[in-house]
Amino acid sequence: FGEVGGANKLPTNLNNWINKNTKFESKFYYSDSRIRKKNFVFLQNDALRTSISNEIYYKYCKSDIGNFSFFKAGVKFKEYLKINKLDIIHLHWVNKMLNLDDINFLSSIKPTIITLHDFHLLLGGCHFLKNCKNYLNECSNCPQIGKKISTASNQIFKNKKKIFEKNNVIFIHMNEESLRIGKELYKNNYHELIDCTVDIKKFN
């Protein structure tokens, strides 16, 4: 996203800071609306495939859960990006923008950092755990989606693991639990903690 939410604020501020204070150039790629700002680039994704993804989710998710999502349609990067001119790619919350094919394409040709704003890019489809331990079994038997598509979370998890380990993606974690789970699941990748949590003794 490029307009609202905490997962947008961090890369927006980082993008602006790099362009203002360093010799490097940063470009912010987003997909939610056509913002006209310097160093912001809009990427159009496939509305039909995104609609199909949403339809599958709402048909088969458990009625009391709003915590699982499939990757959307993705974008055609060769039409938008001059990949060879980039030194590094930094991904943030990309669920509604990129799919796994896109992430594999990007991370296979350029050093890629992923800052994790939730658990979605680590696990089989959920954004937070809700005390689920199925990630220890490669996200099999996901409690959030129905039996007819119950193998989807396991397949998504395996695809992520294959892509991230093959392409040596770097993970930036925002809390200790994410760091612990990331190191446990993706042992071949580098992990770093930049703590963005709040003191729950002072805030609630």
Image (cartoon, grey):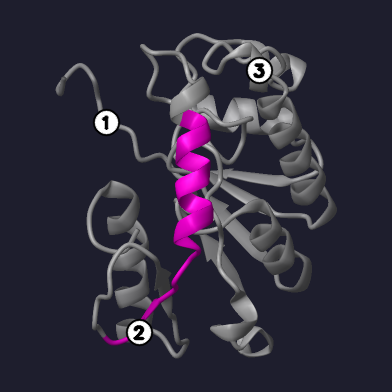
Q: Position of residue 37 (x, y in %)?
A: 24, 83
Q: In x, y percent, where is residue 53?
A: 52, 42
Q: Is 79 colored magenta in this rendering?
A: no
Q: Which amino acid, by three-letter code, is at mark 1?
A: Val
Q: Nearer the viewer, residue 71 or 170?
A: 71
For the record, the magenta segment spans: 38-57
Q: Which residue is mark 3?
A: 148
Find the distance from the CA under tag 1 to the CA under tag 2: 31 Å
Measuring 36% from the left and 73% from the top, which residue is drawn there?
15
Q: Earlier in the sequence, mark 2 or mark 3?
A: 2
Q: Amino acid at mark 2?
A: Asn
Residue at label 2? 39
Which numbered mark, 2 or 3, is in the foreground of this view? Answer: 3
Residue 119 seen by the camera:
no
Q: Position of residue 74 (x, y in %)?
A: 56, 60
Q: Is residue 91 above or below residue 135?
A: below
Horizontal side of residue 117 vs 1, given as left or right: right
Per the rendering, the mark at residue 127 is none
3D distance between C-alphas at marks 2 and 3: 44 Å
Task: Reply above or below: 135 against 37.
Answer: above
According to the picture, the residue beneath numbered tag 1 turns out to be 198
